[in-house]
Image (cartoon, rainbow, N blue to C red):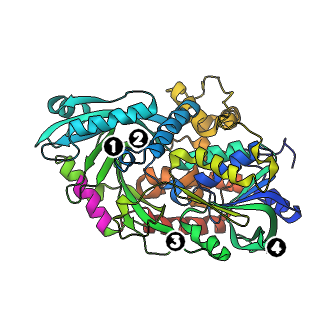
Amino acid sequence: MSEANRGPLGGSRDEILTALRTADEWDLIVVGGGITGAGILREAARCGLRCLLLEQKDFAWGTSSRSSKMVHGGLRYIAQGQLKLTHDSVRERERLLNEAPGLVERSEFTMTHYKGGFPGPLAFSAVMNVYGALAGKRSHRFYSADKLSAQITPGIREEGLKGGTCFHDAIVDDARLVLRVLYEAMHNTTAQALNYCRVESLLKAEGRVAGVNAVDELTGETFSLKARVVVNATGVWTDTLRKEVGQSAVVRPLRGSHLVVPSWRLPVAQVCCFMHPADKRPVFIFPWEGHTVIGTTDLDYPESLDEEPAISEEEISYLLDATNHQFPGAVIVREDVISTWTGVRPVISSGKDVDPSKEKREHAIWDDHGLITVCGGKLTTFRLIALEVMAGIRRYISGADGFSPQAPIFSSSAATQTVSKFKRDSENVLRRLKGRFGFATEDVVADIQDTEWTPVANTDCLWGELRWAARHEQVVHLDDLLLRRTRIGNLLENGAQGELRRIRAIMQEEAGWDAERWIQEVGRYQALWRKAYSIAS
């Protein structure tokens, strides 16, 4: 495939399938299209390795599109003694803020303090001093109860309020972060990535893993793909491939759910952090994409990993109770909820009967005769995890060390023009596009039609972003477009039902969907949205 006809995610799906049919052997096959797999592919491509990423569903379909959207150091890890994890996280946070403005954005967080409650302001300030030292900068300040309730977080519960400590972390669109990293990987012609291609089993030769057997979920076509190394970056599905090399289960799947409500119903200008009145777990209420998000829970997930996870009645009540306790005048009810999302975290089990929230979030890497498995860790530290995996690959591939560990994650955007077609707030629009599309921003700007510089309803997403995704980003199903390439399915009533007529025209023009295909996709999407992204009536 020539450089000239490669899109930001490589060639068309048919071209990538042709490459699978004709390739003799790959240097590296990465199984899993979340942030960890994308990061590994990016570093392998930087080395010039012939590498392939296969994702059983859509890119970022699992945990990497359903996180709490935070790029942070993890304050609670300090209390757990995980200082290295916190140090690495805050340093990577700063790197992401510097390299991907418009996608990763600094946000102010406020931890509230109440009489007799945890944490107290002095203890929290001590933790924040450690946090600031690890980050190389001090960024916290205590506000009195009067100032906090009047200026910082109006509407907050005032009974027993001692004040609040404000500090800085960051917010991200996690699914777009995955796509941006894949853009960087595919910018190199030695890398390919394919969604809806499921790895069924491992190929083995001479006592070691030598590739994978995969099936295209759309056509049923099967592939036997040889590779010098296979990386298992499948998150909560980690144990499936490891069982083939005789290893026991290590993953404890934990569910975390979130509610989305209109910002006018619960207006917050920053992240409000507080302890749930029932179990004293931390809860966050924060602004995201012009809306307000409430999260998260932390529960064992005993259900099938192959089904879309959905919020439970227990979690709905838990999050609403927390919200109305902290903002008693808001009176948020089920009818206020626009959408939900539930992610399943791949936490490595401690092997003990411990509370889910007390399980450590550090990652682990295993090498099982050519199958390198990585599991756990944080979205924030995906680059460091990828570098550690690459270090393990060197014993199999000598070319896996041809880069600097300090090399940037992202290429800089060359787009400097003012988006004059978009008359309102053009500087912020260009910042948003640069954050999401990076080096491809110039092409995105050139591609957007005059009539598609307008936002979709009351979101920040432009109609032109939907068309770009449909044309260039391997959109296979309607939910790929509305829940991951863009987030309008999370931000608009009934999963953006009111915008489907115009979306249909885009998919007809860009993907060739006829009337029958459109009806199938709408039916599939609406059933999925009701089951996994809404509050059932």
Secondary structure under the numbered disc 3 in the rendered image: loop
The amino acid at mark 1 is: Ser
Q: What's the residue at 47%, 44% (across, down)?
A: 84
Q: Nearer the viewer, mark 4 or mark 2?
A: 4
Task: Name which of mark 4 and mark 2 comes first in the sequence.
Answer: 4
Crowding near the residue tagged with mark 2, few <14, some 14–19, many ≥20 C-alpha atoms within 10 Å: some
Determine contact: label 4, label 2, CB under 8 Å: no
Cα separation, mark 4 vs mark 2, equals 53 Å
Write down the region rendered in magenta.
Answer: 314-322
Which label's residue is closer to the chain start, 4 or 3?
A: 4
Q: Position of residue 100 (x, y in %)?
A: 57, 34
Q: Quadrant of residue 115?
A: top left
Asked whether, in this view, residue 16 is left or right of residue 444, the answer is right
Q: Is residue 319 magenta?
A: yes
Quick check: 296 above or below 166?
A: below
User: Circle 2 is placed at which residue position?
Assistant: 290
Give amino acid for label 4.
Answer: Ala
Badge 4 crowding class, 10 Å Cα cut-off, few under 14, some 14 to 19, many 20 or more, is few
Residue 263's disc is 1
The Cα atoms of the two marked residues, 4 and 1, are separated by: 57 Å
